[in-house]
Image (cartoon, grey):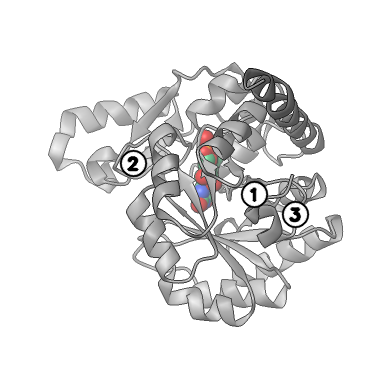
C-alpha cells in the first residue's frame, strides 16, 4: 500500500509502532521494521544518551530497514539531556523521530538540519496545526481511546480524525484504538494515511516484556481501562488493577487537594517492575481500550501481514461490492 506516510518514511506498509516506555526496545522496533512497518525505539527508556546510542546500534544489527526513535518531552523539573539524545539519534543515522508530550519547536532546527523526519504525536487539532506550523513532517493523531496520555479534551477518533483531515495539509496517522485491518481501512476512510499502534504491539512475540503483560492484554476487555491523574491534568489511560483502584480511591477522597506526591507509589518507577518482572499490580501502566480487540500474541510479521491482508480484502471485496 502506498500513502504519503509510506513515502515519507520509506516503508512498505503505513503502520507505525508508537514509542512505549520499557516496551520500545531494539527487539520490538526491529521486528516491526522487518515486517514492513516503522518500528520505534523509546528514547527515554534508555537512561543516558550513550545507552540510547547502544540501543540504536543493536537495532541496526537486527534490521536494515528504516526505524525511528521516540522523544517524549516531559514536564519534569530535571530535564533529561535532550541535546545528548538528539546527538545519539543523528550519529546513529536514524532518520525518523516521533516527538510527544510537549511542543518540539525548540528541537526542530537541530532535527531538520540533519534531515530527520519528525512525526509529532498530539491529541487535538490545535496541537496538530501547531506541529504543522513549526515544520513537522507529519502528525500522529491520538484519540481519547488511546493507551497512555489522551490529553484533556476527550475527543474520540471518529470525530478527531475527520476534524484533523479538514484542517491539516501534512499527512497524519490515526493513533489510539487501532488493532487490525478494519482499523486501518477506517482510518484511511477518515482521512489518515496510516495508523500508529501501541497496545496491539505489546501483545506480540517479539515485544521484550514479561509474558504476564501480554496475557493481561489478551484477557482484558474494552471495559478494563481507567483514566488516572485527571485532577492533575496529566490524564493517563491505564489497565485497571489493585494499585489503580487504590489510586482512584485517593483521587476521590482528596479531590482538588490531590498532589502528585499522594500517588507517587502507584505511578512512579513502576514500569520496570511491570514490564520486566511481570508484577502486574505494581502500579498504573498505560493500556488502550483496544485491549478488547486483542485476542492473541502473534509475531510482528504475522500481525502486519494479517492487517494488510484484511485491509486489502475489505477494500477490494466488502467495500467495492457495496458500491457495485
Ligand atoms: C505501555 C505503554 C507505554 C507508552 N509509553 C509512551 C511513551 O513513553 N511515549 C509516548 O510518546 N507514548 C507512549 N505511549 C503511547 C503510544 O505510543 C501510542 O500513542 C498509544 O499506545 C496508541 O494507543 P493504543 O494503545 O490504543 O494503540 C505508551 C503506550 C503504552 C500502551
Q: Residues within 10 Å of mark 3 (few under 14, many from 20)?
A: many
Q: Are marks 2 and 1 in contact (CB under 8 Å)?
A: no
| Residues under numbered marks 3 and 1 in contact, where contact means CB atoms less than 8 Å apart | no
Q: Which corner quadrant holds the N terminus?
A: top right
Residue at the left extreme?
256
The answer to whether residue 107 is above or below residue 256 is below
What secondary structure is found at the residue carrying circle 3? Answer: loop
Sequence-earlier tag: 2 or 1? 1
Which label lies toward us, 2 or 3?
Answer: 3
Upstream in sequence: badge 3 or badge 1: 3
- Find the distance from the CA under tag 3 to the CA under tag 1: 18 Å
Residue at the spot x=73%, y=22% of the render?
A: 317
Q: Quadrant of the C terminus?
A: top right
Q: Residue at x 49, y 33 (%)?
A: 282
Rendered image: mark on residue 235: 2
Q: Which residue is mark 1?
A: 24
Q: Position of residue 18 (x, y in %)?
A: 59, 48
Residue marked by disc 3: 11
On the image, the x and y values in percent for residue 321 come to: 69, 19
Q: Quadrant of residue 258?
A: top left
Q: Residues within 10 Å of mark 2 (few under 14, many from 20)?
A: some
Q: Residue at x 75, y 60 (%)?
A: 66
Mark 2 to mark 1: distance in Å?
21 Å
Q: Quadrant of residue 89?
A: bottom right
Rendered residue at 55%/65% (across/down): 137
Amino acid at each position: 500500500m502506498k500513502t504519503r506516510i509510506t513515502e515519507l518514511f520509506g516503508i512498505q506498509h503505513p503502520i507505525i509502532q508508537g514509542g512505549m516506555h520499557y516496551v520500545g526496545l531494539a527487539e520490538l522496533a526491529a521486528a516491526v521494521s522487518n515486517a514492513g512497518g516503522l518500528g520505534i525505539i523509546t528514547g527515554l527508556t534508555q537512561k543516558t544518551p550513550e545507552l540510547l546510542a547502544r540501543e540504536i546500534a543493536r537495532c541496526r544489527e537486527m534490521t536494515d530497514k528504516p526505524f525511528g526513535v521516540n522523544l517524549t518531552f516531559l514536564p519534569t523539573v530535571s530535564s533529561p539531556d535532550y541535546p545528548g539524545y538528539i546527538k545519539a539519534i543523528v550519529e546513529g543515522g536514524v532518520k525518523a523521530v516521533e516527538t510527544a508530550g510537549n511542543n518540539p519547536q525548540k528541537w526542530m532546527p537541530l532535527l531538520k538540519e540533519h534531515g530527520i523526519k519528525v512525526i509529532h504525536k498530539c491529541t487535538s487539532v490545535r496541537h496538530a496545526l501547531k506541529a504543522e506550523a513549526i515544520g513537522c513532517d507529519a502528525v500522529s493523531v491520538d484519540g481519547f481511546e488511546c493507551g497512555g496520555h489522551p490529553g484533556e479534551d476527550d475527543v474520540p477518533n471518529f470525530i478527531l480524525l475527520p476534524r484533523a483531515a479538514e484542517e491539516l495539509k501534512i499527512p497524519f496517522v490515526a493513533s489510539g484504538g487501532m488493532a487490525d485491518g478494519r482499523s486501518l481501512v477506517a482510518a484511511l476512510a477518515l482521512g489518515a494515511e496510516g495508523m500508529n499502534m501501541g497496545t496491539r504491539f505489546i501483545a506480540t512475540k517479539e515485544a521484550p516484556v514479561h509474558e504476564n503483560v501480554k496475557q493481561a492484554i489478551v484477557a482484558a476487555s474494552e471495559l478494563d481501562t481507567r483514566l488516572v491523574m485527571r485532577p492533575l491534568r496529566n490524564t493517563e489511560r491505564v489497565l485497571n488493577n489493585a494499585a489503580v483502584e487504590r489510586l482512584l480511591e485517593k483521587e476521590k477522597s482528596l479531590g482538588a487537594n490531590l498532589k502528585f506526591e499522594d500517588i507517587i507509589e502507584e505511578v512512579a518507577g513502576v514500569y520496570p517492575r511491570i514490564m520486566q518482572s511481570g508484577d502486574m499490580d505494581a502500579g498504573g501502566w498505560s493500556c488502550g481500550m483496544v485491549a478488547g480487540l486483542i485476542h492473541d500474541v502473534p509475531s510482528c510479521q504475522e500481525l502486519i501481514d494479517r492487517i494488510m491482508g484484511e485491509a486489502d480484502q475489505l477494500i477490494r471485496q466488502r467495500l467495492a461490492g457495496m458500491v457495485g
